Image (cartoon, grey):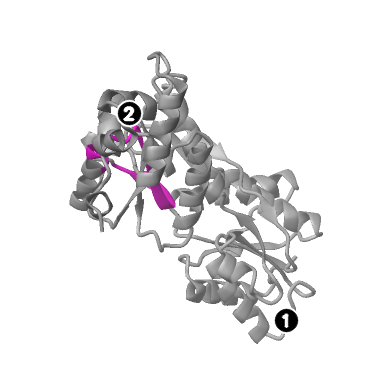
Amino acid sequence: MSETTRRAVTMADVARHAGVSRSAVSFVLNDRRSVSIAEDTRDRVLAAAAELGYRPNAGARALAKKQSDWYGLVTEIVTAPFAVDIIKGAQDRALVDEKYLLIASIESDPAAETAAIERLLEQRVEGLLYAATWHRAVELPEIAREVPTVLVNCFDVEGRYPAIVPDERTGGRRATERLLASGHRRIGFINLDPDIPAAVGRRVGHHEALREAGIALDENLEISGHATADGGYAAASVLLDLTDPPTAIFCANDRMAMGAYDAIKERGLRIPQDIAVIGFDNQELIAAYLRPGLTTVALPFEQMGARGVDLLAAIIAGQSTGTGTVTVDCPLLERASV
């Protein structure tokens, strides 16, 4: 085995193999067209580099260019539901500009979060995406301000960073309008824990749709399911045992809808013939495999990842410096539960 196959191939190796100076190799491999290099010399250098398997030193190139062609993405455990969708949307959009993601996976530990961002900054990333797996307020370490930073599925408590978040309000409204369009007038609402942004937005949208349809709000038809299947089952049981039960239930996430299905079927009722159900999130392993399939409002994770990169690229290019919040539409996905 030769020396050049045991270690990283250098420009000096390419120069020796091609029989040219190291400077000529540098000019060719860095595509310095302003320097006059004969075409046969250029061809020899490129052929030698390909034959030896030369790869440019990304760190050195970043130092020379003062940029790395990398974005850093900080997110919670990447196996969490939806995290992979944010990553996919961000990476696909970054590739359009020939950029790549360096991903730092963190838990809810401020020290680990700071360390992760520091490591990304050491790699000279051009900017940061900070992505949460559920919509909430966050507080970033001060070092995040060293490069352009965009928040995805979360927002900064102090309003210092631009943010991409789902349009929870319109999503809630859309779910209720779908039930109204099917003729339902007595609609139960199983919400998340009341103070989180998703619960607030979805409740506001639900109420708007009811008011516009001329339907008075009935507090007996609203209950928290605490975001779990067990909570959805318990909440649906309360609604179904009312003297005047609802003919449809809007569950503010798919896990609660799964629990509601069980409560409905225990009472010998059919979905959607006897009672309609609509969810929120489009958690694929739930919504697509319930029987009947669950009609639900989708959280646009891929789109938020892509919009985050769009905004980050604009800021880096000097086209945008705002710190406002951008909302992304939550589409309705029809299946068979309404």
The residue identified by callout 1 is 269
Residue 205: x, y in percent?
61, 47
Amino acid at dot 2: Val
The residue identified by callout 2 is 25
Q: Is 125 inside the magenta-drawn segment?
A: yes
> Quick one: which residue is furthest to the front in this view?
19
Number of other residues with Cα within 10 Å of mark 1, as a class: few under 14, some 14 to 19, many 20 or more: few
> Residue drawn 41% across and 62% down?
80
Query: Is 180 placed left or right of 111 in the picture?
Result: right
Say if 304 sits above or below 181 in the image: above
In this rendered view, identify the residue nearer to me: 34 or 117. Answer: 34
Element carrying mark 2 = helix
Q: Could one spot residue 302 in this view of the protein?
A: yes
Dot 1 or dot 2, earlier in sequence: 2
**Rendered image quadrant of residue 70:** top left
Residue 271: x, y in percent?
73, 75
Q: Is 97 inside the magenta-drawn segment?
A: no
Query: Is 151 placed left or right of 266 in the picture?
Result: left
> Residue drawn 37% across and 32% down?
161
Q: Are marks 1 and 2 in contact (CB under 8 Å)?
A: no
Q: Which residues are magenta?
A: 120-139
